[in-house]
Image (cartoon, rainbow, N blue to C red):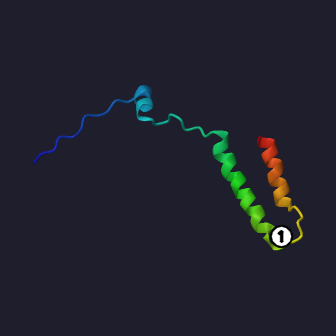
Amino acid sequence: MHIRPLPPGPSGPRARAATGAGAGTRLHWWALALPALAFGLLLLLLAGSGEAHAATGEVSGLVQVAEQLLRAVA
């Protein structure tokens, strides 16, 4: 059985745009900001876990930061 090779495909800017190569490679600002924010908040949770104030009723620094972030976003 003999298999014929495929003919060469089109090349050039239109062919690259049609296949998606090079199109849409820029990231939106939130694609980097949201994971960085999530990492920072998790890091704060881990760092502040030794100073638990559950019974005292005090608002922790993490809660204050989260409230400020929510006010800034909203």
Residue drawn 85% across and 55% down? 64
Given residues 23 and 69, the one toward you in this image is 69
Residue 48 in the image: x percent, y percent?
A: 81, 67
Amino acid marked by disc 1: Ala
The C terminus lies in quadrant: top right
Residue drawn 68% across and 48% down? 34
Is 56 rendered above or below residue 69?
below
Given residues 14 and 41, the one toward you in this image is 41
Given residues 21 and 56, the one toward you in this image is 56
Q: At numbered mark 1, what does the secondary structure look like: helix, strand or loop?
A: loop
Residue drawn 77% across and 42% down? 73
Mark 1 Cα shell of 10 Å, populated few (<14), some (14-19), many (≥20): few
Q: Is residue 11 left or right of residue 67?
A: left
Is 66 rendered above or below residue 22?
below
Q: Is residue 5 left or right of residue 72?
A: left
Residue 72 in the image: x percent, y percent?
A: 81, 42
Residue underneath mark 1: 54
Q: Is residue 29 left or right of residue 25?
A: right
Is 10 rendered above or below residue 47?
above
Residue drawn 66% across and 43% down? 30
Is 53 rendered above or below residue 42?
below
